[in-house]
Image (cartoon, grey):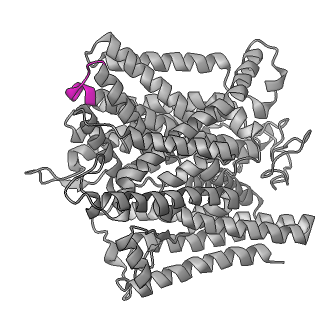
Amino acid sequence: MPKSAHPTPDLDTRLPINAYTALKPGEVYDPVVPAASRPPEATWRAIGWGIVLCVLFTLASAYSGLKVGQVMEASIPISILAIGLARAYRRRSTLLENVILTGIGGTSGAIVAGAIFTLPALYTLHLSPHPLQTIFICLAGGCMGVLFLIPLRRYFVREMHGQYPYPEATAITEVLVTGERGGSQARLLLQATALAGVYDFFVTTFQVWREYVNFRFIGIVETLAERARIATSFDAVTFILGLGYVMGLRSSAILVAGGVLANFVLVPLIWLVGQHATSLAIHPGTVPIVEMSAEQIFRSYVRFVGVGAIATAGIFGIVKSLRVVAGSFAIAARAFHGSGGEAAERTDRDIPLMAILLGVVLSALAIAGFFLSLETTLAWVLIALGLSLVFSFFFASVAANAIATTARNPVSGMTMLTVIISSVVLLRFGLSGQAGMFFVMAIAGMVCTALSVSGQTITDLKTGYWLGSTPAAQERVKFIGVVASSIAVGLAIVMLAQAFQFGEAAPGDTRAVLAAPQASIMQALVQSFMSREPVAWLLFGAGAFVAVMMEMLGVPALIFALGMYLPLELNLPALVGGVLSYYVGRRAERAGAEPGRDMRERAVIVASGFMAGGALGGVFGAALRLFPWYREDLVRTPFFANEPVSQLVSAVGFTFFCWYLWRKAMRK
């Protein structure tokens, strides 16, 4: 395409000063690419490369996720690849083309997370799904995730500008903008990315030193863990440090506060009460509490309290956003009838309302047809359809809120809740046995994929808002990514199911085992409820009241609930990043307007580099696990097994990256 056909304006590729702050009354945010500009955006180049990278990352993520239970972060590495690909053409790709490419490619991680958390359970339950069924479950969930998120865009992206930190979107935006600008800022980004990538790659892939620091080699720490079940650890990697910096002190502190309540209050209390039941397993635990470690008590009991808190906090979030969501529908309706001047601006134009409604209707009909093909009654089909739609719509807001604040989507917790409620409802209507398990896992697969895609889509839309993309263009191409990734992951799971066993090894089966840890949990849940075992409603209710209490105190309930649900070792490094963010901000205020802005900008670039490097390290580590010759001890230091030395080295390494961020931010 000739350069003159799409003239690109001379842009100031520096984010506006109010990009990350709340707008004052009457103030507006002007993106990097002005609304009046029309640079190339959803071109064949961007779409083509987006599909290629989407499929490649889907296939790699499917295997690594089934093997170790973690889906590699795709969007940030793909944004880095987009910068490199932009320079491979005679007409350099525009900033908005890179946004489109990143959005399509990043869909891979979301679809894979939804698939591997649920679909392997269909095989371990011996339900023998057809390949087209696995593809359809992912496709239906992905489409619902995008469709139900679009009406929420104005609320989360525009109306709440500066209210949410959007850590992942910040990292992607900084990567794309800094790559576009080049110069010293690009060198700083590349340096931070390279350092963090090498560090996180080695510490998470090989046996160089401990990734987790728990100081259990100190006597008093070990005594507390053994006698009172007061224990935690610290994941000393750079990715979470950068994440915490972008989150800021308040959000990261609230997140850790939830973890403190869960790990240092609830776990010891359960141990204190249950340690005397030496021969009785208390539901939902499977062994007596006296035999459990602190981590087992957390997973068996406290995590369900966190799930109840997340669900209740999600309800509060939906209620708060109803007014703006209704306003978004009204604006879209006026635009459809030709009187919507408010939506005429390119950077605030969504897919038309009628197209969204038509997409929801077609998705509902397709899902109903899917359940009808299972040869069941019309009542069961309608119940399954209703559960799929209600949960997907409900969790779209929860996922968007979680991603916007902490960049962590409570996928497994919300899917567990879906499995539990769906099982209870379907049992009441007489659906049980193998057919009931298939229904429940299909619903869970669609819902899990929907909320995963919703979270990833809000990240893309916020990135586009900062940079000046057309929301409608981003939303349309998102469906392309959903289709490509759904087909790829559906076929990948089918092929892996032929070559491997999921979960645990079956007697007489000589195939290698892929752990599929999340799917194994879902399998155990659905078998438990279809066997009519009691539901831990008391734990869910306790979590609900915790969320109510947070709302009464004026504390963001969802962030606190996520802290209760997520392992504390993943949140503590984020708090360190939040503290760094606070002190960098204090120093920037004293430095004055322009020098202070430079300090903040350099610090965000370094933090984004940490996130990008950590994500790249994870991608390379996952790629190595695809080869049969890979072993963790291929690279092993002599002191790896020496806990005091190994953990202290890890602590020193983490401290170095804290110093590095501070030093680069303060540079004159």
Coordinates of residue 92 in the picture (x, y in percent):
71, 51
Q: Tell me which residue sits at (38%, 28%) in the image.
A: 136
The residue nearer to you, when weighing 203 against 295, is 295
Q: Residue 623 magenta-drawn?
A: no
Can see residue 40?
no
Q: Tell me which residue sits at (44%, 41%) in the image.
A: 540
Q: Residue 434 magenta-drawn?
A: yes
Coordinates of residue 265 in the picture (x, y in percent):
48, 60
Coordinates of residue 272 in the picture (x, y in percent):
37, 62
Q: Which residue is outermost to the left?
A: 508
Compared to residue 145, the image places residue 58 above or below, namely: below
Tell me which segment is drawn in magenta.
429-437
Can see residue 202?
yes
**Quarter that holds the N terminus:** top right
Q: Tell me which residue sits at (46%, 55%) in the image.
A: 72
The residue nearer to you, when weighing 270 against 132, is 270
The residue nearer to you, when weighing 240 against 578, is 578
242 displayed left or right of 571:
right
Compared to residue 10, the image places residue 570 above or below, namely: below
